[in-house]
Amino acid sequence: MILKPNQIFGLVTLTSSGARFTSTTTNLQFQSRTVSAKMANPAVSDSEKKLITHVIFDMDGLLLDTEKFYTEVQEIILSRFNKTFDWSLKAKMMGKKAIEAAHVFVEETGISDSLSAENFLVERESMLQEMFPTSEVMPGASRLVKHLHASGVPICVATGTHKRHFALKTQRHGEIFSLMHHIVMGDDPEVKQGKPSPDIFLAAARRFDGEAVHPSKILVFEDAPSGVLAAKNAGMSVVMVPDPRLDSAFHETADKVVKSLLDFDPAEWGLPPFTDTTA
């Protein structure tokens, strides 16, 4: 089955007062006046790329190789029901708040009568807590973060992960995350709705020092389809670093797609170029 992007994300309607997003999976609506009209055409021009001054990173599957843990645990749970976990379902869950992804999981797999979203989260928790401390850094992540920080580019993290999981995932990688100006997590009070709502990226943008940063000056790095659209809904540019197993149909919304952070060229976006050629 080929999964269409609007099966996950919903529809964005541009209006005179902003943009209204309707989620086809959660029936949530919000209105944001900060969404740029370029949403109608996600491509970013070369002149717009040169405006980038700030960078926001997603975490799971982008900076840290943690998505595999969720996949493994969910495969184990579904095996009890003689069902399999595939990438069409994975794509619907990636980047969302835990409870939102849990509802997708039990409803899409048809096990909601046997396992509630809440009980699903409880069941997978003990397994995940053992796995998270073994998280590894994704290729190119450390190099890029250190380069941007050393070059004076303001950087931060916007992750759907909650505080308790963030501590477990990052406990071996304090050096990288200490370079972030700030970190916004999924249980932050300002994040009312998970991705593809722009809440988390707009909250992250507001917390940089100085005057409010215009969304057009922010570059977001994401691996999840819902995260890419969340950034676009916030009026920001997006570089997508997708898992190779993700259907390429989800690449279209991103402004740039790279196989790895090792392949990202800062100079293309008006950011300080790398001064070395090693990762």
Image: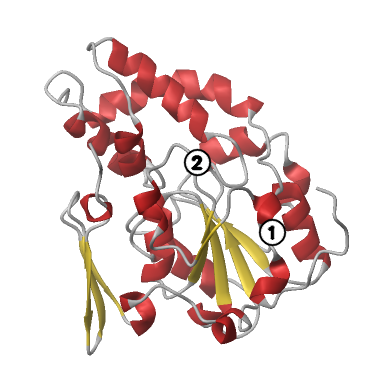
Q: Residue at x 37, y 46 (%)?
A: 97
- Please, is residue 50 above or below residue 93 in the view? below
User: Which of pointers 1 and 2 indicates the residue nearer the eye?
Assistant: 2
Question: Where is residue 197, by image quadrant?
Answer: bottom left
Q: Residue at x 48, y 43 (%)?
A: 162
Counting from the top left corner in percent of width and height, residue 127 is at: 47, 18
Of residues 81 and 33, which is closer to you in this image? 81
Counting from the top left corner in percent of width and height, residue 210 is at: 64, 83
- C-alpha gap between disc 1 and disc 2: 24 Å
Counting from the top left corner in percent of width and height, residue 245 is at: 44, 36
Label at residue 243:
2
Residue 34 seen by the camera: no
The answer to whether 2 appears left or right of 179 in the picture is left
Counting from the top left corner in percent of width and height, residue 271 is at: 71, 74
- Please, is residue 195 above or below residue 101 in the view? below
| Marks 1,2: beta carbons within 8 A | no
